[in-house]
Amino acid sequence: MDEKIPLFIVTGASGTGKTTVSKELRKLLPDVDVFELDFIHRIVGDDDWRKIENIWFRVARNVAASGRISIICGTMMP
């Protein structure tokens, strides 16, 4: 993959509106993949946040391989 595809990360403390922003971003940017960091935590129930972050970074890398931009929203420090 020669072309660099950007990855945007929206962070903030709990309750600051990241989920609301992610919903609006999906509407405004239909050609961009928007993910919520907490989604895997809710599905898998794993509390290893470093592991969850790494899963999302792999997802974003794979999305970029298809030429699409990703936005990850969550309480994390990249």
Image (cartoon, rainbow, N blue to C red):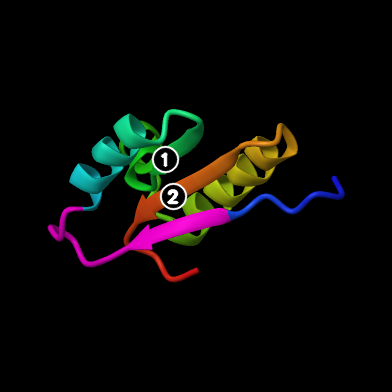
Residue 21 pos. (x, y %): 24, 47
13 up-or-down from 54: above or below: below
Residue 71 pos. (x, y %): 46, 48
Q: Do callouts 1 and 2 mark residues in contact (Cβ within 8 Å)?
A: yes
51 up-or-down from 43: above or below: below
Number of numbered discs overlaid on the protein picture = 2
Label 1: which secondary element: strand
Residue 43 pos. (x, y %): 36, 31
Left or right of residue 61: residue 45: left
Disc ID at residue 18: none
23 up-or-down from 56: above or below: above
Badge 1 amino acid: Phe
Is 11 part of what is drawn in magenta? yes
Is 57 part of what is drawn in magenta? no
The magenta region covers 7-17
Question: Considering only order in the chain, which callout, 2 or 1, is on the residue closer to the N terminus?
Answer: 1
Q: CA distance from mark 1 to mark 2?
A: 5 Å
Left or right of residue 50: residue 47: left
Residue drawn 57% across the image and 43% down it: 69
The foreground one among 16 and 37 is 16
Residue 68 pos. (x, y %): 62, 36
Badge 2 amino acid: Ile
Label 2: which secondary element: strand
The foreground one among 48 and 39 is 39
15 up-or-down from 61: above or below: below
Residue drawn 53% across the image and 44% down it: 70
Which residue lies under the disc numbered 1?
35
Question: Dot 2: within a 10 Å radius of its alpha carbon, few (fewer than 14), some, or many (20 or more) residues?
Answer: many
Disc ID at residue 72: 2
